Amino acid sequence: MPGEVALEASGLRKSYGRLVAVESLELRVAAGTVLGVLGPNGAGKTTAIRMLTTILPPDSGSFTVAGVPHTRPTAIRRRVGVLPESAGYPLGQSGEEWLRYHAELFGRSRADARDTARRLLADVGLADRGPALIAGYSRGMRQRLGIARALVNDPDVVFLDEPTLGLDPMGQAQMLDLIGRISRERGATVFLSTHVLADVEQVCDRVVILNRGKVVAEGTVAEVVRQAAAPRHGQVKIPPELLDRALAALARTEVLAVANGGGRLGELELSMPAGLELEAAATQAIKSLLEAGVPVLGFTLEGGRLSDAFLAVTEEVS
Ligand SMILES: Nc1ncnc2c1ncn2[C@@H]1O[C@H](COP(=O)(O)OP(=O)(O)OP(=O)(O)O)[C@@H](O)[C@H]1O
C-alpha cells in the first residue's frame, strides 16, 4: 500500500498516576517505512507501543494503524505484529510448535498453520532448528523466533521493542538484516524502538526522538541531525612539527581543534559549533592554517552524527 499512511497518532497521552509517560504523541508514518524511535530511558517508547498496539488505552488523543481507528482495537490487533521488550518463550515447546499455535490463534487451518510456521522459520534463518526445543535456542535465535511470531498474521505494521538488546555482533547483524527485509520483501511498516543509534543509522528510513513523552525531533537521519543543530566534526592533517602553530591558528577561529594521538600523527580533530554554516567553518579553519604558514595535507568533513543530535535534543531537560 505505497503512499498510504500506516500509522498516525494525534495528541496521544498516557499517565501512570501523576507520572506523564507519553505527553502528546504526534506521528504520521508512511506505509513501508522503517521508523526508528529513539529516546533515553523512560522517554515513553514502550508506553507508546503499548498504546498503538491497543494493549493500553490512552488517556486522551487518537490514532490509526493501517487506516483502522483506535476505536476498533480487535481490527488493529489483526493488522499488527509485536516483539515485546522482554518477550517470554515456552521453553518446553519447539519453535515450530509455538509458531503453529500462534498461526492457529489467528484462525489458520492446521495445515496452513504448519506451512506458515515452516515458511517463517526459514525466513528468519531457523529452518533447521524448528523441531528443536526453544530451551536450547540462543538469545539471538529466540529474538528471531519472536520476529517470526510477530509475522504469523502477515501484519501491516510490526512493532519491535529493543530487538537487538543483549545480542552479540553476529546476532545484531542478523536482526538488522531481518528488519530491513520485513519492509523490503513484505512491504510492512516497522516501528523500531531502540537505544542503539547505529541500528537506526543502518536500517531506518526515518527517525523520531522522544524525550519525556514528547517528540523532540523527527525526519530522516540527515534532517534530524540538521534540526538538532548538533556540532559537526572533521579532521585535518598537517605536518606534525607544526602542531603548536596549527593549534594557535585554529584557536583564533570558532572551530575547536584537538590533536589526535598526542599530536604525533599531525592529525587534528575539528568540531564545528552548532549554528555555524559547515562550509563557512571549514573555510575559516583552512584559511587560518594557511595564513599561519601551516600546509593542509588532508581535510575531511563528516556527515552529522546522530549521537550528537540525540544528545542535543535530549540533554537540556534530562
Ligand atoms: N506500569 C507502569 N506503572 C507506572 N509507571 C510506569 C509504568 N510503565 C512505565 N512507567 C513509567 O513511565 C515512564 C515511561 O516508561 P516507558 O517504559 O514507556 O519508557 P521507555 O522509553 O520505553 O523506557 P526504556 O528505554 O527504559 O525501556 C517511565 O518513567 C516509567 O518508569
Image (spheres, helix red, strand yellow):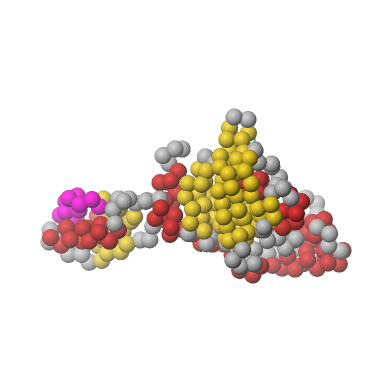
Whether residue 306 is in magenta: the answer is: no
Which residue shows up at 64% across the image and 63% down it? 188
Left or right relative to 269: residue 58: right
| Most common secondary structure along the magenta stretch | helix
Q: Position of residue 122 (x, y in %)?
A: 71, 68
Q: Is residue 21 visible?
A: yes
Which residue shows up at 39% across the image and 55% down it? 226
Comparing 15 with 87, the one in front is: 15
How many marks the image carries: the answer is 0
Residue at the far bottom in the pictured view? 185
Q: Is residue 198 visible?
A: no
Q: Position of residue 158 (x, y in %)?
A: 66, 57
Q: What span is in magenta?
A: 244-255
Which residue shows up at 83% across the image and 67% down it? 112
Whether residue 254 is in magenta: the answer is: yes
Q: Position of residue 16 (x, y in %)?
A: 63, 33
Residue at the far top in the pictured view? 18
Which residue shows up at 56% across the image and 39% down it? 23
Quadrant of the rendered image containing residue 109: bottom right
If the image is split into quadrants, where does the N terminus sit? bottom right
Left or right relative to 306: residue 75: right
In this rendering, the answer to whether 114 lies above or below 194 is below
Left or right relative to 131: residue 286: left
Left or right relative to 313: residue 6: right
Comparing 149 with 165, the one in front is: 149
Q: Position of residue 30 (x, y in %)?
A: 58, 61
In this rendering, the answer to whether 22 lies above or below 290 is above
